[in-house]
Amino acid sequence: MTRVYGWMIAGMALALAATGCVKTPAPAGDEASLRALDAAYVEAWLLDDAARQEKAVLALFDRSAVIMPGGGMPPEDGIKNLKAFWFPDGAEPTRVTHFTHEIDNVDISGALGVVSGRYTLSFTYENQSITQAGNYMIVAEMSADGWRITRMIWNDQPLTEV
């Protein structure tokens, strides 16, 4: 099974390089720092202060990152669009009350890493409390500043809506 994941990572690296996502060779990363990026993503959403939350979440992403949200929503690309998606101007802040990632796999090939697993999330937005669970995958690239998320996809299954 590990060999299959290795081939998948190599294939993803070639596909990303062909699209220009992988710009220049970067130092190889290690699994612990890629796991730390995943943990930092969760921790950033759990911050109580909306301004700090926004800054911490967006700092983890490459400027040209693409997210593919659950629920069949269209992809969003670029840090400006990620900000508008998660932190729209004039909107009530999202209050995340619970967020966990259970990592199933971490794969690294040179400067490209992939983390995948399951998540649970509870939050309140526009007076609506939502709890959901699903699968997620983060694709990250190692740069001189450390790992940055270049692609993220998640699916979700709403568990409750109040």
Image (cartoon, rainbow, N blue to C red):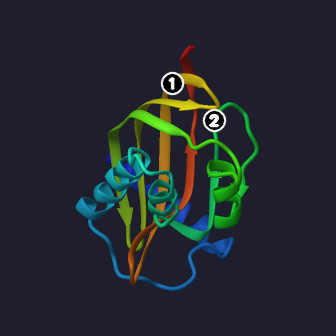
Q: Amino acid at mark 2?
A: Gly
Q: Amino acid at mark 1?
A: Gln
Residue pointed to by mark 2: 70
Quadrant (top left, top right, bottom left, bottom right) of the C terminus: top right
Q: Secondary structure at mark 2?
A: loop
C-beta proximity under 8 Å, tags 1 and 2: yes
On screen, residue 24 above or below 134: below
Name the side, left or right, on which 132 lies relative to 29: right
Circle 2 packing at 10 Å, graded few (<14), some (14-19), many (20+), is some
- Asked which quadrant contains residue 14, the reply is bottom right
Farthest residue to the right: give it: 74
Name the residue nearer the viewer: 18 or 92.
92
Quick one: quadrant of the N terminus?
top left
User: Which label is found at residue 132?
Assistant: 1
**How far from the left and from the top, in percent, is residue 35?**
30, 55
Q: Position of residue 12 (x, y in %)?
A: 55, 60
- Figure check: 127 above or below 73: above
Res. 66 image quadrant:
bottom right
